[in-house]
Image (tube, rainbow, N blue to C red):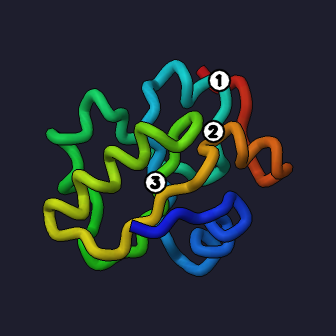
Amino acid sequence: MDEVTPQEGQRRVQAGALLVDVREQNEYDDVHADGAQLIPLSEFEARYTELPKDADLVMICRSGARSARAGEFLAQHGYSKVANLTGGTNAWVEAGLPSVKGQG
């Protein structure tokens, strides 16, 4: 699984990759990368099939640890185009990339 910087993650999303946030709903509501699709890690094993196997996926969480676990799970289930965003949402926001704050 690739590790990508926030800038590379955004480039991939702009090129058509799906950005998948695996944090919990309350964390997502506080702040999330613009365009991120929420599938909480607590629901991930039940919902991962919502993600297309042929799509490029960029996994994101708060700091990069949970998204790495989710990405490894996907790789074990036949997903080959998975990247983990190093530093997670914290790094995305610090890089000044588009984010949404305070929903919910």
Residue corresponding to mark 1: 30
| Between marks 3 and 2 in the image, the one whose residue lies nearer the viewer | 3
On screen, 35 above or below 15?
Answer: above
Q: In which quarter of the image is residue 103?
A: top right
C-alpha gap between disc 1 and disc 2: 7 Å
Q: In which quarter of the image is the N terminus?
A: bottom left
Structural crowding at the residue carrying mark 3, measured as other residues with C-alpha within 10 Å and reported as few (<14), some (14–19) or many (≥20)? many
Please name the residue shown 51% across and 39% down the image. 61
Q: Identify the disc placed on residue 88.
A: none
Structural crowding at the residue carrying mark 1, measured as other residues with C-alpha within 10 Å and reported as few (<14), some (14–19) or many (≥20)? few
Mark nearer the N terminus (3 vs 1): 1
C-alpha gap between disc 3 and disc 1: 18 Å
Q: Do the residues labelled 1 and 2 touch (CB within 8 Å)?
A: yes
Residue 10 x, y percent position in the rendering? 67, 65
On screen, 81 above or below 62?
Answer: below
On screen, 8 above or below 48?
Answer: below
Please name the residue shown 82% across and 51% down the image. 95
Q: Nearer the viewer, residue 91 or 53?
A: 91
Residue corresponding to mark 2: 32
Q: What element carries label 3?
A: strand
Residue corresponding to mark 3: 59
The amino acid sitting under disc 3 is Met
Residue 6 x, y percent position in the rendering? 68, 58
Q: What element carries label 1?
A: helix
